[in-house]
Amino acid sequence: MPSAFFFQSRILSSNRLESTNLMAMERLRSGNAMHGDVIMATYQTSGRGQAGNTWYSTEGNNVLVSFICKDIDLEPERLPVLNMLVSIAVHHVIANFFPVGTAIKWPNDILVNDKKIAGILIETTLSGGMVKHAILGIGININEPYFPSSLPFACSFHSITGQYYDIDMVFKMLFEQLDTTLSRLKQVDFIELQKSYEPLMFGIGVKRYFRTPETKFEGVIEGINHHGQLLIETPQGPLTFNNKEIVFDLSGH
């Protein structure tokens, strides 16, 4: 398939892996990775999410994939741009199926009707003060029939519509969208990207509830700053948060 960012691509598919991101990292460390390599699995025995969370998925029902971005030599301050572009690409794919109710929950989840349908885990390797490599781990819940009671705010294409979907087709859409979107990685202006990203954010301009390790509070998301930090207006004034410093309370209270 024609390629704008990945140049060439090898699809490396396995039935069962511990984690596609772990496999991608191992290939980078061993020198066997090429830019554009795609690690896919039908099942992960230890799927990983943000902040050490596990990624729930039953066998053969979902998109479980990691994209290797090798020798990209990205300035560390441009990492928020990478995160935003990947989030926009995944959002675009899902919004093709669910044009109403799809949103990016900062920094790396995609929701449909306030429930999580996809997650993103970006892991990077630094060298010489630059981001040398990046692994883009993406999970999209496609035909997942049900979720455990411990995941009340999870959903899948199937759980929303009752229909089954072609997983390979969704992957192809994802690859093509990422390839096109990431071709702007080095050139895109942050302010321009911010204007595209912020309207897609879950909870922007609406009173929501949040939790930190210390407290629970209400506030209104105003957007992100050029460091990629979340900006929330609260009754006590504006607050700024990094990834993993805050949790959205999706229960709404």
Image (cartoon, rainbow, N blue to C red):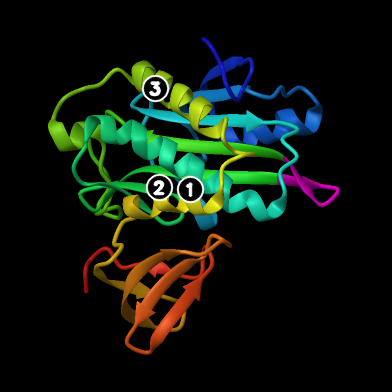
Q: Are marks 3 and 2 in contact (CB under 8 Å)?
A: no
Q: Is residue 24 above or below residue 122?
A: above
Name the kind of residue labelled 3 in the image. Met
Magenta stretch mostly in which secondary structure? Answer: strand
Secondary structure under tag 2 reads helix
Q: Give 179 or 166, whichever is nearer the viewer.
A: 179
Secondary structure of the residue carrying tag 1 is helix
Where 198 sits versus 59, above or below?
A: below
Cα separation between marks 3 and 2: 20 Å
Q: Are discs 2 and 1 less than 8 Å apart at CB?
A: yes
Q: Is residue 50 magenta?
A: no
In the rendered image, residue 16, in percent from the top left (x then y), is placed at 51, 25
Q: Amino acid at mark 1?
A: Leu
Is label 3 in a helix, a strand or a loop? helix
For disc 1, the neighbor class at 10 Å (few under 14, some 14 to 19, many from 20) is some
Classed neighbour count for the residue bearing mark 2: other residues with Cα under 10 Å, few (<14), some (14–19), many (≥20): some
CA gap, disc 2 to disc 1? 5 Å
- Place of residue 9 in the rendered image (x, y in percent of width and height, measured from the top left): 61, 16
Q: Residue at x 16, y 25 (%)?
A: 163
Residue at the disc numbered 2: 196
21 relative to 225 in the view: left or right: right
* Disc 3 packing (10 Å; few <14; some 14–19; many ≥20): some
Which residue is the site of mark 3? Answer: 173
Work out which quarter of the rendered image holds the C terminus and state it.
Answer: bottom left
**In this picture, which residue range is highlighted in magenta?**
125-132
The answer to whether residue 144 is seen in the rendering is no
Residue found at x 40% / y 86%:
237
3 or 1: mark nearer the eye: 1
**Disc assigned to residue 193:** 1
> x%, y% of residue 45?
50, 35
